[in-house]
Image (cartoon, grey):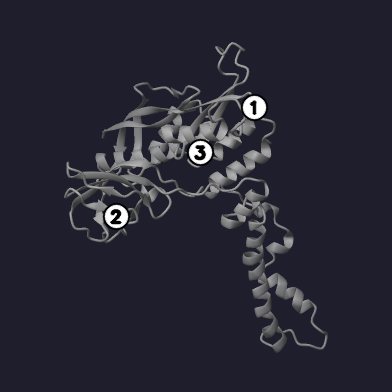
Amino acid sequence: MTISIDNYLPEYFKETADDIHKRMIDEAPKDISTIEGDIFWSTTRPCAEEIAKAKKVALLQVLKLGIVQTATGKFLDLKGEADGIPRKSGEASIQKILFVGVEGTIVSAGRKVSTVADEDNEAIEFLILKTVTIDSTGIATTVAECLKTGKLGNVAQGKITVLTKNLNGIKQITNTEIVKDGVDDESDEDYLYRILENAQNPPTSGNIAHYKKWSKECIGVKSCKVVPLWDKNNGRDGNGTVKVIIVADENKAASDELIKYVKNHLDPYPEGEGRGQAPIGSTVTVVSCIEKEIDITANVILMTGYTKDIVQNNFKKVLSQYLSELSFDSTTYISLARIGNVLLDTDGVVDYSDLKLNGSAENANLSNEEIAVTGTVEIEVVL
């Protein structure tokens, strides 16, 4: 979300060094020469330039950092915290680690394992959390937490292969699955959205805005929908029931772990007793959004020097980025025309024809719980 305040700046912020210097010259004593090159002119000119620079750079930056829509970093944190909305901190990835070795070998908690470093990337280190012993099968499994928070610890299976200090009896190590996804610190853009949403839709007394605020407080939740009175089969025509549909970071379906986390934050078991954020008497059901794959086919004319594979990969990247930025709250269909614009903006594409979404030359509709993700992409090159 990019905000410009240029149209709202006071006039004195727009003064140039020439404007400031002219005013200084005009205020000079009558008996002082103000001709360019004389002492008064030469000594005041640098001062005018520094004042202009201070206004355009330093003072303007201070002004921007003092306004929530243009504040960044720690200054945005201060704005959010003043409204009771702290930034969501990142979390470290936890991986399941498999050791192969000699029976009886002990792998102690506190040891480190890592990925392999190369010319472009440093090794990503993980700390073993639980002591294990190689059993009679020659294997043992434990868990290790990344030493840095964020998504960088979500390395693919088989990438953690290094024990940072040799241990006799260990023949091989590898990571077999992600136990807990690492999450980056909340971005300025997402954080600002929550702050403004809170201001524009004040949460109060367990209203829909309140449930949205509570849900989005949870690390890993990007967006959500709230359905009040949803369980019409509860014998009370839905009274006291609330359904929250959550979307994970990057507009993806939520994991079982994230669903449980949000449920415990809102309404832990035993339900409806007000042990979480939800009021007493409210039973909250938390579910994930449903990923709907958008399969795309099209005929394209390529620019000189581009191949089908290059353009197809380029299109997949920009398409995935486009879909990840769509609002879960307001997106009810995927526009054929907008996908066409994305295709036209793809490097290597001159023009296209016969574009189809999920086999149809029409918009792809989404249900209330669906979110669009990239499916198969097949382009055919035409002359």
Q: Which residue is mark 1?
A: 280
> Front-most of 101 and 59?
101
The residue to which callout 2 is attached is 113
Mark 2–mark 1 distance (CA, rounded to whole Å): 46 Å
User: 28 left or right of 75?
Assistant: right
What amino acid does circle 1 point to?
Ile
Q: Are marks 3 and 1 in contact (CB under 8 Å)?
A: no
Residue 34 seen anywhere in this rendered image of the structure = yes
Image position, residue 320 (x, y; %): 39, 38
Q: Residue at x 42, y 32 (%)?
A: 256
Mark 3 or 2 closer to N-term?
2
Measured Cα–Cα span from mark 3 to mark 2: 31 Å
Q: Is residue 253 visible?
A: no
Where disc 3 sits, the SS reads strand
Q: Amino acid at mark 3?
A: Lys
The N terminus is located in which quarter? Answer: top right
Q: Nearer the viewer, mark 3 or mark 2?
A: 2
- Give the image quarter of residue 19: bottom right
Q: Nearer the viewer, residue 319 or 156?
A: 156
Classify mark 2: residues with Cα within 10 Å, few (<14), some (14-19) or many (20+): many
Name the residue located 65 percent from the left edge and 61 percent from the top edge.
Answer: 62
Neighbours of disc 1 within 10 Å: few (<14), some (14-19), many (20+):
some
At mark 1, the secondary structure is loop
Question: Mark 2 or 1 closer to N-term?
Answer: 2
Q: Which mark is residue 247?
A: none
Quadrant of the image for the C terminus?
Answer: top left
Please provide percent x and percent y for residue 76. Answer: 61, 53
Label 2: element kind: strand
Q: CA distance from mark 3 to mark 1?
A: 26 Å
Dot placed on the residue nearer the N-terminal end, 3 or 1: 3
On screen, residue 341 versus residue 72, left or right, reads left
Mark 3 sits on what residue?
Answer: 222
